[in-house]
Amino acid sequence: MPNPVVAIVGRPNVGKSTIFNRLAGERISIVDDVSGVTRDRIYAKGDWLGKEFGIIDTGGIDITDEPFMSQIKLQAQVAIEEADVIIFITSVREGVTDADENVARILYQSDKPVILAVNKVDNPEMRAEVFDFYSLGLGDPYPISGSHGLGLGDLLDAVVAEFPSDDESAEEEEVINFSFIGRPNVGKSSLVNAILGEERVIVSNIAGTTRDAIDTTFTDVEGTKFRMIDTAGIRKKGKVYESTEKYSVMRALRAIDRSDVVLVVLNAEEGIQEQDKKVAGYAHEAGKGIVILVNKWDTLEKDNNTMKEFEEEIRNEFQYLSYAPIMYVSALTKQRLNQIPAKIKEISENQCRRIPSSLLNDVLMDAIAHNPTPSDKGRRLKIYYLTQVAIKPPTFVLFVNDPELLHFSYERFIENRIRDSFDFEGTPFRLIARQKK
C-alpha cells in the first residue's frame, strides 16, 4: 500500500513552508516573509510514530490578482486532489481573513479530511484568539508555532488518525507492479499502448489509489502477472496537470511509491533533461528497481558508435544508476518491446534476492585480501561480519570496529564486489555499517 499524502495549503504568508520544513525534518522550502515566495509545489517525505507519509507544500491560495496567484491557486488544487489528508494553515496574528474563508470554500469541495491549524501561536496568551477560527466550519483548530515547533505533535496525531486504514491493503495474488516515468512527450503512453497490443491477456482494469488513474493488469506468456501503474493524467486530456510540466512530477512520485520496478523513459531525439535526473533520483532513493528505456530509437540516424556514445552519456549523467540496465526501444516499431516484461521480472527477482551470510563473508574476506582495509590517524578499520537483513531493496549490515573509519571509497569497493559476485542488476542496495558491541 502506498504511503498516504498530506497537502499543506493556505493563503500566502501564514508559515506553510516553515511547517513543511518541520514535518520533512530538513530545510527544503524557501522561507521568506514576502507574500507568494513559494510558487511551486514541493514534495518530501515525513513520518510520525513510525507512520511514513508524503508531504506537499503549495503556493498560497489568494483571491487577488497578484502575479502568479492564478498559477499558485492551480497548483494548490492539484495538491489537494493528490492528498489523502489536508492541513489548512492559518495565522493567529491576522485572525480569520477573507482569504481564509476563500480557502475554506475550496476545501469544502475537496471531500477530503481537513485538519485546521492556526500558526504563529508563539505563547500561551495567544491561545484564546484561536477560538475565532471555529467560524471557518472545519472543526477544532490546532494551535501551533512553526518557528518554535509547538503543538506539532497534536497536529500530527490528528493527521495520522485520518490516514486510510492498513486493513485496506488486503492480501492479493502475487503481481509485479511497474510504471513508466519520464517527462511529457517522451512516449510513455505509446509504450503503454504498444505493450498492451502484444499478445498478452488483459486480466482486469483496477482503479488506482491516485484519482483518475487506471492500473492495467496483464499476464505474459509464461503466466507472470504484471500491474502497469498509470501515472494518472498522462493520457487524460483537459486536466489541470497538463498545463505545466511540473504537475507530471507529482504524479510520477506517487506512481514510483506504488511500483516495484520503475522504467525511466528518455527521448532519444531530445537526449537527457534535468527533470529526467530528478525523477530517476527519487526512484533510486526509494529503493525501487530501475530500467532506463531510450524510446524513439528508430528515429535516429545511427552508425557503429551511436549506441555506445548514448550509453556513455547516460552513465555520465546518471552515475548513481550504474546498476540499471539500458534498453533501446521504439513504441512505433515495437523494437525490443517484447523484452521488457522479462527484464522487469528479472529485476523484481533481484530485488527479492537473499544471499546466505556464509557466501557474503566469503566474498568479503576475498575482497579484504585483495584490498586491505584503510586506516585513519593510526587506527585501522576492522571488518568482522557481513549479513543481509532485508529485501526490496536488498539491505546489508557490515559489522565493524568503528563506522567512522569506513571511508566512502572503501564502502563503494565492497558494494562493487558484492555486485560482481551476485546478480543485483537493476536494483539499488543499501550497505549499513554498525559498530560491533
Image: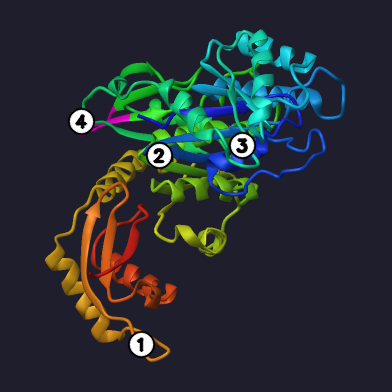
Mark 3 lies on a secondary structure that is: helix
Residues at marks 4 and 3 touching, judged by CB atoms closer than 8 Å: no
Circle 1: is it few (<14), some (14-19), or many (20+) Cα within 10 Å?
few
Q: Which mark is residue 19?
A: 3
On the image, the x and y values in percent for residue 376 come to 41, 86
Q: Residues within 10 Å of mark 2 (few under 14, many from 20)?
A: some
* Front-lying residue, 403 or 413: 403
What residue is rendered at 69% in x and 20% in y?
129
Q: Secondary structure at mark 2?
A: helix
3 or 2: mark nearer the eye: 3
Q: Disc 1 residue type? A: Arg
Q: Nearer the viewer, residue 83 or 139?
A: 139
Residue that numbered label 1 is attached to = 379
Q: Nearer the viewer, mark 1 or mark 4?
A: 1
**Position above or below: 178 against 324:** above
Q: Quadrant of the C terminus?
A: bottom left
Q: Bin the neighbour count of mark 3 within 10 Å (Cα to Cα): few under 14, some 14-19, many 20 and up.
A: many
Residue position for label 4: 223
The quarter of the picture where residue 258 lies is: top left
The residue to which callout 2 is attached is 337
Q: Horizontal placement of 48 versus 31: left or right?
A: left
Q: Is residue 279 magenta?
A: no
Q: Is residue 244 found left or right of 317 in the rendered image?
A: right
Marks 1 and 2, the one that precedes in the sequence: 2
